[in-house]
Image: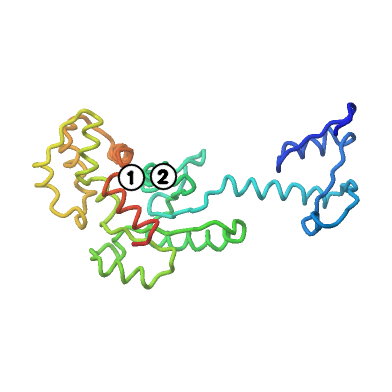
Amino acid sequence: MVPDNCQIWIATHSIGFLRAIQQELKNESQIIEFKNDNKWASEKYILKPVQLSRLEWQKLFSTALDDLANLICPKVIIYCEGRAEPTPDGREQGLDADVYNTIFAKYYPEVMFVSSGGNTELDQRSNIAIAIFSKIFTDLKILVLKDRDIASGNLTNEQTRIQYLNNQDENYRILKRFELENYLYDKEVLREYCQKNELVFNEEKYDEIVQDIDNENLKDKTGAIKSCCGLTISINPEKFKRNLAGCINNSMKVYRELEDVIFKRK
């Protein structure tokens, strides 16, 4: 079908391909537009090259850029509490987002957790994101995930948590446990961590320290929790928590509870 002195090049929404036609191959190329509203299966059309104006180039590049944007943009962005400012090269600095991304990256590759400050900042920034991104990425879903200290730091119970969710928009989520550390410092996770690092988990000592895994403020007990794992050397608390996150997998009760809270709004 192709004569000896001809070539056919086919590329799907390639920006590099379009740029080459626009510049290096502009005197050797022609572009034919296959319009969406044509009835290709039932009618005949005479195909003619497009007269390439700046407007036509904009249309061509916008198609490629739209597809590229949807490829690099996650399907779900979940705003959570934590340090909002990124590193100078744009990497996440918030502990919570880093931990959640570690836990769920394998099982939910199209989801990205982003730290966005404290409780009230979380509301403000997520509202701005919804207003802006929803106009650009129509398929993007934005969720808001909060710790259970929603009553100005006061302890809340499960009934209060449910009441809060019932009076918020559908995109809001609240942890069942007090905060993220109550999941990371669960026996199930600590046992796995100790096994991976050839340490001995002191369960008896742990039971003396942790009375209520759901409701206690365990962040202040990080040093004691580390000692239950037989860690005698100095380890940065944030590094310790990130390492614990890497021990959580989808066979664990801790994982399933977090999954239900975040992705099923239970």
- Residue 133, percent across and down? 57, 58
Q: Quadrant of residue 14?
A: top right
- Name the colour scheme: rainbow
Compared with 107, 142 (above or below) is below
- 1 and 2 marks in contact (CB < 8 Å): yes
- Pick the residue in front: 131 or 36: 36
> Would residue 75 appear left or right of 223 to someone viewing this image?
right
- Residue 36, percent across and down? 77, 56
Q: Residue furthest front?
A: 42
> Would residue 218 appear left or right of 203 to someone viewing this image?
right
Structural distance between the alpha carbons of marks 1 and 2? 8 Å
Q: In which quarter of the image is residue 200?
A: top left
| Amino acid type, residue under disc 1 in the picture | Asn
Mark 2 is surrounded, within 10 Å at the Cα level, by few (under 14), some (14 to 19) or many (20 or more) other residues, namely: few
Mark 1 is surrounded, within 10 Å at the Cα level, by few (under 14), some (14 to 19) or many (20 or more) other residues, namely: few
- Pick the residue in front: 186 or 86: 186
Which label number is shown at residue 159? none
> Would residue 25 appear left or right of 188 to someone viewing this image?
right
> Would residue 258 appear left or right of 138 to someone viewing this image?
left
Residue drawn at the location 27% of the way across and 49% of the way down: 254
| Amino acid type, residue under disc 2 in the picture | Tyr
Residue drawn at the location 26% of the way across and 57% of the way down: 178
Question: Is disc 2 placed on a helix, strand or loop?
Answer: loop
- Residue 31, percent across and down? 84, 43
Question: Is disc 1 placed on a helix, strand or loop?
Answer: loop
Q: Name the residue under label 2.
A: 107
Q: Mark 1 points at which residue?
A: 250
First along the sequence among labels 1 and 2? 2
The number of callouts visible is: 2
